[in-house]
Image (tube, rainbow, N blue to C red):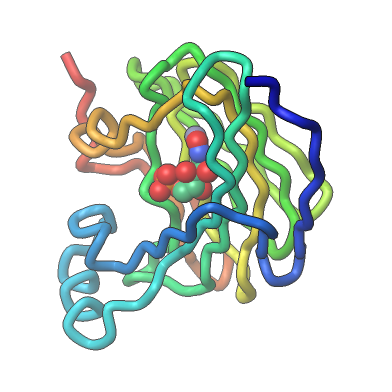
Amino acid sequence: MLMRPFSMHLDFRRGDLTPRDRTNIRKLSDMRGMFFNAEAELLALEKENPIIYSFQERVFPEENGYLQLAVTTIHPGKIGDEYFMTKRHYHKRPDTSEVYLGLEGEGWLLMQTVGGDFESIPLKPGVAAYIPPYWGHRMVNTGSTPFIFFAAFPGDAGHNYGDIERAGFVKILIEENGKPLFIDNPRWKKIE
Ligand code: PAN
Ligand code: ZN
């Protein structure tokens, strides 16, 4: 069936996509074991289990030729010294790209290949980043306000959380003396 052209509304400040098909909420309990400081993670879980981020999606056919659209809001905060961040993933079809556009707040885009090649790009309103094929990706909120960004990716890209979940990212982003600092992740292991 022929899809008709259409428009939608993007509220940059609130991170609202209208109309939308679904809203996903990721609490700390959905990200167990992903923060570096396991003790701080457990404490925060027991105390309030905070919402780390949420994302609103327009869902289209999972086929070549279409695009999927999403707006993500990462709340400000830290677990230990590590900033709130997204889970991260590769695409199920790893040879697919994605574009992220910063709408509100500030943060960093962390990217990594299966071989351990690492790249990072700072994002703020008006900055768009191109994530090429084969790069796993994660966003991190390094500011004190919500970090909101828009994403567009191929209809059939899909999401693969497992591969990075096992290996972790080579670097993590922590706050030191009030500033973001990249440090090596001692837990990271290359998948053989
Ligand atoms: C984004 C992400 C979104 C949430 O739309 O899916 O920011 O992050 P996680 O998927 O890592 O939980 C995207 O990259 N889509 O492909
Ligand atoms: Zn993606």
Q: Position of residue 154 (x, y in %)?
A: 57, 24
Q: Is residue 168 positioned above or below 16 on the image?
A: above
At 42% from the left and 25% from the top, the residue drawn is 91
At 19% from the left and 20% from the top, the residue drawn is 191
Quadrant hosting residue 68? top right
The foreground one among 181 and 141 is: 141
At 40% from the left and 64% from the top, the residue drawn is 25
User: Does the image show residue 183?
Assistant: no
Quadrant hosting residue 148? bottom right
Q: Is residue 82 positioned above or below 69 on the image?
A: below
Q: Quadrant of the N terminus?
A: top right
Q: Quadrant of the C terminus?
A: top left
Q: Position of residue 87 (x, y in %)?
A: 36, 49
Judged from this view, the residue extending furthest toward the front is 1
Numbered disc total = 0
User: Does the image show residue 155?
Assistant: yes
Q: Is residue 101 left or right of residue 139?
A: right
Q: Is residue 65 left or right of residue 8?
A: left
Q: Position of residue 141 (x, y in %)?
A: 55, 61
The foreground one among 149 and 116 is: 149
Q: Is residue 112 positioned above or below 186 on the image?
A: above
The foreground one among 47 and 57 is: 57
Q: Position of residue 185 (x, y in %)?
A: 30, 43
Judged from this view, the residue extending furthest toward the bottom is 47
